[in-house]
Amino acid sequence: MRILEKKSLKIRYLHRKAGLTLHVLLTLLPLAAGAVYALLYSVGLAGSLAAGFTLRYWESLVSRGTLWQTFAYSAYIMGVSIVLSYASALAMVISARGRLMERKGSRIFYLPLAMPALVLAFFAFRFLSGGGWLASLAFGSGLIASPQEFPELVNDPYGLGIIFVHFLLAFAFFSIYLDRVYANERIEEQVQSAQLLGAGYRQSLRRVVWPMILRKTWPAISLYGLFVFGSYEVPLLLGRSTPEMLSVRIVRMLSRFNLDDRPEAFAIVFAYMMLTVLLVFLLRKSKGGLR
Amino acid sequence: MKPVTGKILWALLASLFVLPAAYLLLLSFSASWHFPLLFPDALTGKWWSLGFTSRFALLGSMGLSLGIAAGVSLLSTFAAFFSSRWMALSRYRSALLLSAYFPFVLSPVVLAAATYIFFVRLGWNGTVAGVAFAHFLIAYPYAVILFSGYWNERLLTMDALAATLGAGSFQRYRRVLFPLSRGVLALALFQTFLISWFEYGLSSYIGLGRVPVLTVEVYRYISEANPHVAAVASLLLVFPPLLMLWVNKRFLIRLI
């Protein structure tokens, strides 16, 4: 009996070990190996250009401002897309008093989520470009006389097309999510209590709804922001070569014939990976952050 | 909000959400549609029939994408179910869960760029197995995060009770854990399927364009300035998620 018990414990121990080892192998190992390789490549210790330790690729990136420009542009697209979509979704949810998804036809909010970003970017390109549907509408109504007169909405320096697609996706997502949070946290009841105690409508929004919703949803906002920051397909189709979003820039630098670009591309990869790790850590440490 | 304003806003939103699918559907059936036409001059089914010929082979691409997504979804769901159970019992639970967030939030194409050399060394670049494994690397952490809140005291106690009553590990999974977890398993299966199904950057980078999954084909037709076949391929790409939406809308909400 004792032998059987011992054997069962041993099997249990092996299962546990296997489960946890599998997890580490699949999550941390590829990431750590990739980060180390990117770092070594960027300082001249790995890859086809390895000729001994050097910081010249990093210095070149920093002095030309490429690193900051890429990060700043990605952060700008992320910030504008998230703020616009979150604010619009919140306004919708508040005006529907958390019963947005109970309305007839609310299933349409799920439609953009059924579309890959690549497909939405393709649609946006056909719809917003100079020879696209919106330009045809402007031409038909006499607003423009030729496609050249139509404002640049795709492949433009402000990333309007990219923001449009991210807005569409994030607005749908936040509307569904915030509506659920509004109902689950019984925010409407809290608003009514605040108003019974003498708070005005605006005051109850500012003091009750906004703090409660933000506290509950900011991990999702941050994660969604990180997705937008690293997005690839949308800026690939709708962006331009300068300024350029991070993922597109990395891939473009890695696919160029000029091999000198590769160490710099890996320097951006490493910086981005470290930034992501730092942000996830901060998100985890913060109050009410990731579980 | 006044009822009329609300109705107008609702109608605007409905058109904004429906527009992409409706536009692509019309584009896929249009003989030609260019500036300044607001609607196609004639309708035709030739892009659909052309899409399925040997030249375009969209059906083959769809089959390949379905195969990869189904395999990735099955493997990542069950691997994550297995490892998340042990994570729930581990004293390092918090650190282990944190490790799942890193590959999950990182841009998939950057992950592909950073790890590409290892795929080359293993001979997996440009192969179906390589693309499937790369998808698995992002689908698995997602499933772990999804299951992380699932292993509550009640479930773990049921599992322990079954063990005390003499059930072996296999029996506990088969008779206790899987039947109790049907809902969350279905959710993880569908959502990891979508992660793989929607993935473009990773597939094109690791697959080198030699693994013609549907997303890679959509991009190819767009860059070849073949918008009608790109629209057909896009609609094929949208079809399974729409089917999921019809079955259960919860399947489409990822991230939370």
Image (spheres, coloured by chain):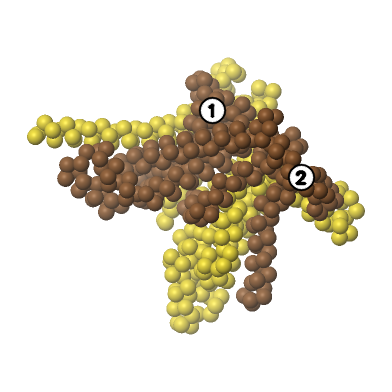
Q: How many marks?
A: 2
Residue A49 position in % (x across, y down): 60, 19
User: Which mark is first along the chain, 1 or 2?
Assistant: 2
Q: CA distance from mark 2 to mark 1?
A: 34 Å
Residue bearing mark 2 = B44
Residue underneath mark 1: B128
Query: Color of chain A here?
Result: yellow
Q: Quadrant of the N terminus of chain A?
A: top left
Up-down: is B97 above or below B9? above
Relative to A162, does residue A192 appear above or below in the rendering? below
Subunit bearing disc 1: B
Query: As shown in the figure, which amino acid type bears the numbered disc 1?
Result: Val
Q: Colour of chain B?
A: brown
The secondary element bearing badge 1 is classed as: helix
Task: Identify which amino acid the numbered label 2 is placed on.
Answer: Thr
The single residue placed furthest to the right in the displayed view is A145
Q: Is residue B234 left or right of residue B87?
A: right
Residue B58 in view in this figure: yes
For label 1, the crowd category at 10 Å Cα-Cα, with few meaning under 14, some 14 to 19 and many 20 or more, is: many
Callout 2: helix, strand or loop? loop
Residue occupying image coordinates x 68% and y 32%: B53
Badge 2 and badge 1 both on one subunit? yes
Which quadrant of the structure image shows residue B114? top right
